[in-house]
DNA sequence: GTGGTCACTTAGTACATGAATG
DNA sequence: CATTCATGTACTAAGTGACCAC
């Protein structure tokens, strides 16, 4: 390891579990108080103007602001919203307002749209003033002091109140996400630091000094009852160190993955049903980069699954399909309700086991009824220190990138994107096609057509020129046009292939940055082509330590 | 084992920003 | 210089997995 300006290597390690020695910060930043509606903007019930109480009005505004969005038409959303809204109403309001369909939020909605429009049309000076005001908030609340370092905080703002928007068919969509008060917030910092002051007239729920955790503040959110944290930015020393550790564990897996694979191939024949199920699950996790699949509380979240929580209904077995034998067809909703659809040929032992697991089961039954993530991870950690199901995702993503870059090493940047895309496909990282996709594809195509025409013209001119005088014969402009055309066509392919694929997630979370840094050095591609500023900050540790000969 | 709590990573999307273009 | 479009950032939901009490 060379001398690193990134000082994590130089500092002594703390004893087990201790994350810092000194932590000081200004506490979280709270969203502005609710501003009541002006008198000329009214809410109507059953055609009659009704002046709502402040609390009920605030919630009505949340709904009115979302009116253009599809989910305000969904039954579950509307019912949850209405139920929670009524809780905020006064007794009188509650006895009047009994039917959401009789509510008219039109004026509030129009006011909101006008506000958005006005913001867009602000003058340069106004925009600048706003920017400066924001910067002031970042300067005051956006940083903390952790040991010797001034560090950027990732999310120093308390989440504002609003209507909960879950992903997919979330049973709690539309519920009121309540305003967080200082009295709900726990502050974590050093005893001997300058303890942040609660906003005037308020106090914190608790001041804690726990240096075995990395969060600066926390509160409990009212929809799921889960804890929300304020934590450091990804470019902090603490996060960087953790990231480096993650990739080191994945590299350790590389050195023993063959042994683990032959082990679970053996286990496919085990007499213990639990062991067989574990082996098949591991086969999927390794081969297909499926997530572990923890159990979830029914009715609390959208119905999504991972490997261990797969149900019979998510898998179809085909003895023969498209010329392959033993094909498993997966169709389920994974994290964020993103669909996973894949037809995979598997080895016969796996196929036979799956058939066995599905015998005498209903579609809604668990595929792996003798297995859960806890057991799986216990087993994995006995095979290798620090090994869990998600390490396979990291390992397979990173090793795939490295292999792909080796195979495709001819065309530089395009091949990097290709390799990145191979990983994103493996990990099923999808996105909604951009709203302007068709449009932007069409403009690009128009450009390509224009170039083609230009090229055709250049060609005929060239012929002409050759006829007239063989001597001068420089085909430079034609070559240039050809090059530009090629570039455009590459761009078009790249964009088309990326339509529904999100590259960012794998780049940020799964691909060992040292692979990319080394590749850039070898290919003489500037790092800026691969990583933008914040990505370079996040991966500072890797940029600092990686030589061209790095191997994952 | 089970169930609950907690801390932390991973994830897609909405919105802001800034570069390219006319 | 204004508009358009691609890229970057903020936001916060939704996972993973450790640990603890019973």
Image (spheres, coloured by chain):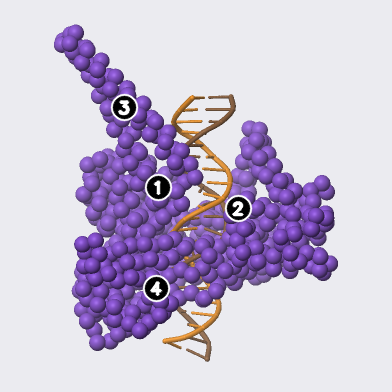
Chain colours: A purple, B orange, C brown
Mark 1 belongs to which subunit?
Answer: A
Spatial CA distance of label 3 from label 1 is 24 Å
* N-term-proximal mark, 4 vs 3: 4
The quadrant in which residue A61 appears is: bottom right
Instruction: Name which residue lies at 25% across and 74% down.
Output: A351
Nearer the viewer's eye, disc 4 or disc 2? 4
Q: For residue A316, which numbered disc appears in the image?
A: none
Instruction: Name which residue lies at 53% across and 55% down.
Output: A154
Spatial CA distance of label 4 from label 1 is 29 Å
Kindly indicate whether the residue at mark 3 contacts the one at mark 2 (C-beta within 8 angstroms).
no
Spatial CA distance of label 4 from label 3 is 51 Å
Q: Which residue is mark 3?
A: A452
Q: Which residue is mark 1?
A: A499
Q: Which residue is mark 4?
A: A313
Residue A428 coordinates in the image, percent (x, y) = 37, 59
Mark 4 belongs to which subunit?
Answer: A
Residue A487 coordinates in the image, percent (x, y) = 31, 33
- Where disc 4 sits, the SS reads helix
The quadrant in which residue A552 appears is: bottom left
Nearer the viewer's eye, disc 4 or disc 1? 4
Q: Which residue is mark 2?
A: A69
């Amino acid at each position: 390891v060379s001398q690193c300006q990134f000082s994590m290597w130089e500092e002594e390690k703390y004893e087990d579990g201790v994350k810092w020695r000194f932590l000081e910060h200004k506490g979280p930043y709270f969203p502005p108080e609710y501003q009541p509606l002006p008198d000329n903007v009214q809410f109507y019930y059953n055609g009659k103007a009704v002046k709502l109480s402040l609390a009920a009005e605030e919630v009505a505004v949340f709904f009115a602001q979302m009116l253009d969005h599809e989910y305000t038409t969904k039954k579950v959303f509307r019912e949850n919203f209405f139920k929670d809204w009524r809780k905020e109403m006064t007794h009188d309001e509650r006895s009047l307002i009994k039917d959401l369909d009789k509510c008219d939020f039109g004026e509030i909605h129009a006011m909101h749209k006008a506000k958005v429009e006005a913001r867009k049309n602000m003058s340069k000076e106004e925009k600048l003033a706003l920017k400066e005001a924001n910067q002031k908030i970042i300067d005051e609340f956006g940083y903390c002091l952790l040991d010797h370092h001034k560090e950027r905080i990732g999310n120093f703002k308390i989440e504002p109140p609003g209507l909960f928007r879950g992903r997919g068919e979330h049973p709690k969509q539309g519920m009121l996400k309540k305003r967080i008060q200082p009295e709900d917030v726990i502050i974590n910092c050093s005893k001997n630091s300058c303890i942040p002051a609660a906003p005037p007239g308020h106090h914190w729920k608790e001041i804690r000094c726990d240096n075995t955790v990395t969060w600066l503040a926390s509160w409990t959110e009212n929809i799921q009852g889960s804890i929300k944290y304020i934590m450091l930015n990804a470019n902090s020393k603490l996060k960087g160190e953790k990231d480096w550790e993650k990739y080191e564990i994945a590299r350790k897996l590389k050195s023993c993955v063959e042994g683990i694979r032959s082990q679970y191939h053996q286990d496919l024949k085990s007499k213990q049903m639990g062991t067989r199920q574990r082996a098949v699950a591991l086969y999927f996790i390794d081969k297909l980069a499926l997530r572990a699949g923890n159990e979830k509380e029914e009715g609390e979240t959208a119905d999504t699954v991972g490997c261990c929580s797969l149900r019979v209904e998510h898998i179809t077995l085909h003895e023969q399909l498209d010329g392959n034998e033993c094909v498993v067809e997966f169709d389920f909703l994974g994290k964020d309700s993103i669909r996973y659809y894949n037809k995979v040929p598997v080895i016969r032992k796996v196929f036979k086991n799956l058939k066995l697991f599905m015998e005498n089961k209903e579609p809604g039954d668990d595929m792996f009824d003798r297995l859960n993530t806890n057991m799986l991870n216990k087993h994995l950690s006995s095979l290798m220190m620090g090994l869990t199901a998600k390490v396979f995702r990291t390992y397979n993503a990173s090793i795939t990138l490295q292999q792909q870059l080796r195979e495709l090493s001819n065309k530089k940047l395009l091949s990097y994107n290709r390799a990145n895309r191979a990983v994103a496909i493996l990990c099923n990282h999808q996105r909604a096609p951009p709203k302007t996709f068709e449009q932007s594809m069409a403009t690009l195509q128009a450009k390509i057509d224009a170039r083609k025409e230009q090229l055709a013209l250049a060609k005929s001119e060239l012929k002409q020129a050759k006829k007239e005088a063989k001597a001068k014969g420089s085909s430079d402009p034609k070559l240039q046009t050809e090059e530009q055309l090629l570039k455009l066509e590459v761009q078009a392919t790249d964009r088309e292939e990326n339509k529904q694929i999100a590259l960012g997630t794998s780049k940020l979370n799964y691909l060992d940055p040292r692979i990319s840094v080394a590749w850039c050095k070898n290919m003489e591609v500037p790092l800026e082509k691969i990583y933008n500023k914040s990505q370079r900050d996040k991966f500072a540790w890797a940029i600092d330590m990686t030589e061209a000969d790095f191997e994952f």
